Image: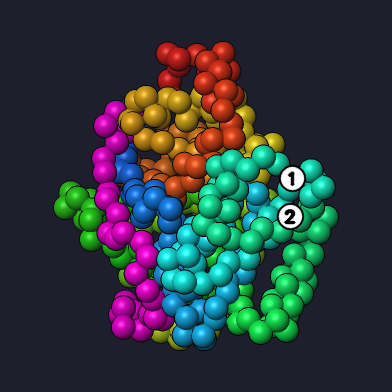
Amino acid sequence: MVPDSAAPARIALARLPTPLEPSPRLGAQLGLELLYKRDDLTGLELSGNKARKLEFLLAEALAQGADTVVTLGGVQSNHCRATAFAAARLGLRCELLLRVPDPSKPPPLEANALLDRVAGADVRWLSPREYQRRDELVDELAHGLQVAGRRPYVIPVGGSNPLGCWGYALAVEELRAQLPPSWEGKPVTIAVACGSGGTAAGVALGIRRLGWKEARAVAFAVCDDAAYFRQVIAGLASEASRRWPGLPPLEGTELEVDDRFVGPGYAQATPEGLALIRRVARADGLLLDPVYTGKAFQGLVARAGELGPRVVFIHTGGSFGLLPFGARLLDEGSGPPQGARL
């Protein structure tokens, strides 16, 4: 195992370790020993998986003398909201580029988009076409900030770069230490949502780093397809191994990507998905979101019979993403009937 001393510098932002909790009822219904890794409890403003990545990314930003962080995502990006609050906590300015259908008619400020502004972030709207050349626009913004005398540090979408991957490479070690003694030496499946690839890559690297032969990860895509994410994850892992030679490369057996539960597209929910969110809330008292964890949990439920008897679901947060769905979330006439088996 690569020792923690070989890891890059980090700063404390997340409330760690997060709890590992057994499913009160749904696991038994699905025929699983199901545990929830509660990374939705890394904080409130800094909730979710993004906090673990930002510990490494913002440590580098401070080391480089940055006074401004620049990042981007969808209008309801959890990553952008977490970055805005982390920047405020550290006394940094924050510039966000957010994708919306029509920048001339910005959406109402609600949920994450509202919280971005509450935290003091400067927000610029991008159209879907502009977002396709986001790297160019981020470079232009960073250059403009430099000309103005500021020192920007750019964070990619979702904080997903080799440095950010360390957040979940170390989270796997934390998770393994929390497992019940009865799980020792037995097969374990780690299920997680995949939106930009960094969390999934970190989990896979963490499994490889520990030499944890009984564990495998299944990443459920919430956008794009499996081929795209396999390429992204392989690239992140390869670059991480190059930058930190003690970090072993992936062999391809640590991670599977499943793209069958994306639905209509990113941040677009189905009636079935919203019904499952209600069921999970009412049966296990767990709050999922329609963008990330709800889709990943759909995959877990659909594949319960083939994931193995012991499953850890990494709850990556995103609860603020529920708010824009409003009445749709409570439409009891949508999705499977209340008595249906999950």
Q: Name the one closer to the observer, 106 or 43.
A: 106
What's the distance in space between the residues labelled 2 and 1, CA to CA? 7 Å
Q: Amino acid at mark 1?
A: Pro
Task: Say if the magenta span includes residue 65.
Answer: no
Residue 131 left/right relative to 288: right
Q: Mark 2 near mark 1, Cβ–Cβ under 8 Å?
A: yes
Q: Which residues are magenta?
A: 1-28
- Residue pointed to by mark 2: 125
Task: Say if the magenta span includes residue 2.
Answer: yes
Label 2 neighbour load within 10 Å: few <14, some 14-19, many 20+ = many
One can see residue 337 in this view: yes
Q: Position of residue 132 (x, y in %)?
A: 78, 60
Q: Name the one closer to the observer, 96 or 29.
A: 96
Q: Position of residue 142 (x, y in %)?
A: 69, 76
- Residue pointed to by mark 1: 106
* Residue drawn at point x = 77 percent, y = 69 percent: 137
One can see residue 220 in this view: no
Q: Amino acid at mark 2?
A: Trp
Q: Position of residue 90 (x, y in %)?
A: 44, 71
Secondary structure at numbered mark 1:
loop
Q: Position of residue 151 (x, y in %)?
A: 60, 82
* Residue drawn at point x = 59 percent, y = 60 percent: 121
